[in-house]
Amino acid sequence: MAVFTPLSDAQVAEFLERFNVGNLRSLKGVPHGTENSTFFVTTERGEWVLTLFEQGEFEDLPFFVDLLDYLDAHDLPVPGPIHDRQGVALQRLAGRPALLFPRMPGAHPSAPNLAQCAALGDALGRMHLVSQRFQGSRANPRDLDWLNRRHLEVLAFLDDADRALMQAEIADYTLAFEGISLPRGAIHGDLFRDNTLYEGDRLGGIIDFYNGCTGELLFDLAIVINDWASDEDGKLNAERYSAILGAYVKHRPLDAYERRLWSTMLRMTALRYWLSRLLVIHVDPPAHDITPHDPARFRLLLGRRLNAEIPPLPA
Ligand SMILES: Nc1ncnc2c1ncn2[C@@H]1O[C@H](COP(=O)(O)OP(=O)(O)O)[C@@H](O)[C@H]1O
Ligand SMILES: N[C@@H](CCOP(=O)(O)O)C(=O)O
């Protein structure tokens, strides 16, 4: 269930008059979102996605609009927000902040093949190349400071071994990253398979930029590898790993510090999701009735990254 604020045809038809997108033909609530109300809208001019923002930091919405405008202008496969006849993207509808997007083609890849992995690495490399010049700024809401602060709230829910592991890991990351400055820019921040759409091997779109921020580019890349290149048992799949990274480094080669901190970043981003999922279950239950993601998946990934050799990075 992901339409938290229902909309009538009449409301949406009137809303569309603000834009130059044609007249409403059909409106359909999207069932599988988790945070916002999402609708597929068809007009005689095309297909659109209407998002009503239900929660989160509304003051960050202008950052997301600017970032998507910027990436769209640089030919990245993202839904550039539609601006109204006055040039304004961010709207209000049914008492909620609202954005209208083009509907991107395709479906989420649950088991991406190597061509799909390469397409993702290529797009992410291109994105990070240009995102270093993006002028907007939003601190990474899930950075090491956040880990240091918020892990304290879940320690009581862990067994002794996991509690010791989480504390030792965060202490290790704090030491490893101290005084080091990695290449930074705008990042997606949550680039899981279900935030992409593919038509066959072609990447049709990268969506859901609401964890987008400015931070370390390597953080984004490590999130991608953990989700896209891990097998069911949590081990890294060497082929998918090489396909993504090989395509990525053609656009943005990694520097010496990034190479040195790569395995630490893979562990840190695994722990980031272990922690955020534990927080959802034990500390901040969602406002709506949705099934929480399983923290055990990222506990497993963290264990694998600690105990198995990480394949070499491509040159
Ligand atoms: N621009 C888009 N093009 C195509 N489908 C989209 C687009 N934006 C969202 N969707 C679809 O709507 C679903 C929910 O959107 P999303 O922004 O991920 O919401 P939530 O943050 O609530 O999970 C996505 O999984 C996707 O299927
Ligand atoms: N994709 C994430 C959810 C988003 O992360 P959050 O820290 O903003 O909750 C997941 O799979 O857990």
Image (cartoon, rainbow, N blue to C red):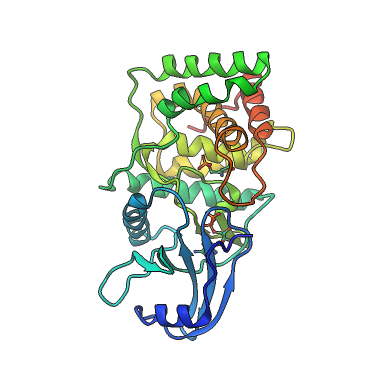
Residue at (44, 50) in percent of width and height: 210
Tell me the quadrant of ligand 1. bottom right
| Nearer to us in this view, 284 or 127 | 284
Percent across and percent down for residue 99 are 41, 65
For the N terminus, the image quarter is: bottom right
Percent across and percent down for residue 139 are 34, 38
Is 116 located above or below residue 315 in the figure?
Answer: below
Is 151 located above or below residue 249 in the figure?
Answer: above
Residue at (66, 37) in percent of width and height: 230
Percent across and percent down for residue 199 are 60, 64
Whether residue 286 sits left or right of residue 95 in the image: it is right
Q: Picture quarter containing residue 145?
A: top left
| Nearer to us in this view, 202 or 156 | 156
Q: Picture quarter containing residue 78?
A: bottom left
Residue at (33, 48) in percent of width and height: 130
Total number of numbered labels?
A: 0
Is 275 located above or below residue 118 in the figure?
Answer: above
Whether residue 263 is visible here, answered yes or no, is no
| Nearer to us in this view, 181 or 48 | 48
Percent across and percent down for residue 53 are 45, 58
Residue at (68, 51) in percent of width and height: 110
